[in-house]
Image: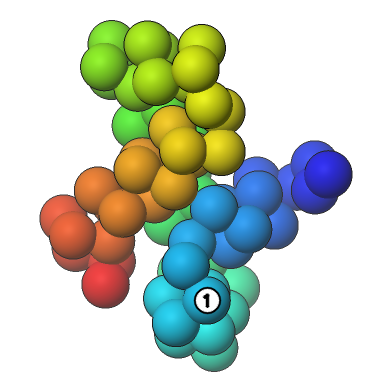
Amino acid sequence: MPTDAVERFLAALDPEHREAVGARPHQEQERLAAAWERELASDDELDTLDELSPPAAEAEAARRVLERGGG
């Protein structure tokens, strides 16, 4: 299981987005990973989903981050 925030963020993305984000500069990847971690920490709906399926919660948070300005 990846421990680095960028690695965890990339792992949460679908393959197409993972490749696109992986091609970006590392600083941009770090910015997106930080936004992803904030999304996971601050959204109550994701907390509930995380109890049922942590990978699904991480994927949903990643999708939201990319929709808002990273994708």
35 sits to left or right of 29? left
Quarter residue 32 falls in: bottom left
Residues 29 and 1: in front is 1
Tell me the quadrant of the picture where the N terminus can be found: top right
Residue depicted at 26% across the width and 17% down the height: 45
Task: Say if residue 25 shows up in the picture.
Answer: no
Locate the C terminus and report the quarter of the image it occupies.
Answer: bottom left
Residue 9 higher or lower than 21, as above or below: above
Percent x, y of residue 47: 40, 13
Looking at this view, name the residue that lies furthest to the left. 68
Q: Which residue is drawn at the image coordinates 56% and 28% (left, top)?
A: 54
Q: Give the left or right position of residue 29, taking residue 5 as reference.
A: left
Look at the picture and state if 28 lies above or below 43.
Answer: below
Residue 37 image offset from top left, x and y in percent: 48, 34
At a point 18% along the width and 60% down the height, the residue shown is: 67
| Front-most of residues 51 and 29 | 51
In the rendered view, tell whether residue 62 sits above or below residue 48: below
Which of 64/51 is in front? 51
Is 40 situated left or right of 64 in this image?
A: right
Residue 56 in picture, x, y percent from top left: 46, 38
Q: Amino acid at mark 1?
A: Pro
As drawn, 29 above or below 20: above
Which type of secondary structure does the marked residue at label 1 adopt?
helix
Question: Of all residues shown, which one is farthest toward the front?
Answer: 52
Q: Number of callouts in the render?
A: 1
Residue 12 coordinates in the image, percent (x, y): 54, 53
Residue 26 in view here: yes
Residue sitting at x 28%, y 61%: 66
Can you identify the residue that label 1 sits on? 15
